[in-house]
Amino acid sequence: MGHEVGENDLAQRLLIAGNWKMNGLASHLNEGRAISEGSRAFAPQLDLLLCPPATLVRTLRDQLDDHVFVGGQTCHHAEKGAHTGEVSAEMLRDAGASHVIVGHSERRADHGESSESVRSKLTAAHRAGLIAVVCIGETLSERETGKTLGVLETQLAGSLHDDVSADDTIVAYEPVWAIGTGKTPSTDDVAQVHAHLRGKLIERFGEDRGRAIRLLYGGSVQPANAATLLAVPDVDGALVGGASLKASDFLAICEAACNCR
Ligand code: 13P
């Protein structure tokens, strides 16, 4: 399952993650295989993660090279039980996942997930031995009313527990208004947010842990803007939605990432 990475070099090593959301039938697995084959040359420099729908986790894991991690898109907080339709972190792990996204804004909006429930999913992910990708992000109206940093601070504080480390937790900043819209914040705005989040992580977890936890940017990352976004200080990778569904686009983003470091 990928290479071992020490806590100290995590912050320098970029992670390019793809979130397929509710897209992907078995016929889509060939895009995953193309990503795996096309990214072999990038493996020494980059970490790669694909998060397909839960139905494809096992098959994708079986079909990809070890340098590509496979993850789920959410998990229930309980290990098992009478929760029809839900998938536990243990089930994702059993299906071959190493990661799971928690707190994506689409889940916060569509399923009313609060930061408290996101934190319980994070705890479940860690219980099952999964690395969690914790998403936070402001809405357009929050941005327009100057609340961005405050909203992010509250989501970050509430979504993490005290024992997180760079080995088990990644944070993804995804402005809600940038998701699937083709709009992105300016690089100055991304830099401001990431510096602020870095500061909050250091304040809570101390210098070493706070610096080592990777901070991804997500929201309309495309081949054309990836190099610019990934060059922003404190951006340790990208969480890619639409462009992760097409191998050529995802690989172009990976190539841009390689050229940034
Ligand atoms: P897009 O890249 O399609 O904007 O989606 C971003 C996202 O939500 C990834 O989790």
Image: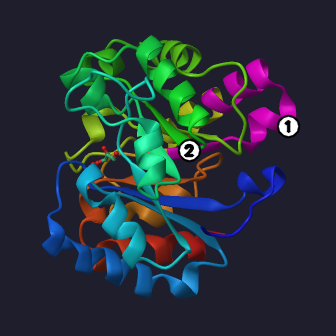
Q: How crowded is mark 1: few (under 14 residues within 10 Å), some or many (20 or more)?
A: some
Residue shown at 43%/63% (left/top)?
A: 226
In the image, what residue type sits under mark 2? Leu
Residue 126 inside the magenta-drawn segment: no
In the image, what residue type sits under mark 1? Asp
> Which contiguous range is marked in magenta?
197-216
Question: Sequence-wise, which precedes: disc 1 or disc 2?
Answer: 2
Indicate the position of residue 3 as horizontal and vertical percent values.
69, 69
Nearer to me, 202 or 79: 79
Residue 208 inside the magenta-drawn segment: yes
Residue 149 to residue 186: above or below: above
Mark 1 lies within 8 Å of ligand 1 (Cβ measured) = no
Residue 186 at least partly seen: no
Q: Nearer the viewer, mark 1 or mark 2?
A: 2
Residue 91 to residue 117: above or below: below
Q: Mark 2 points at which residue?
A: 130
Residue shown at 75%/61% (left/top)?
A: 5
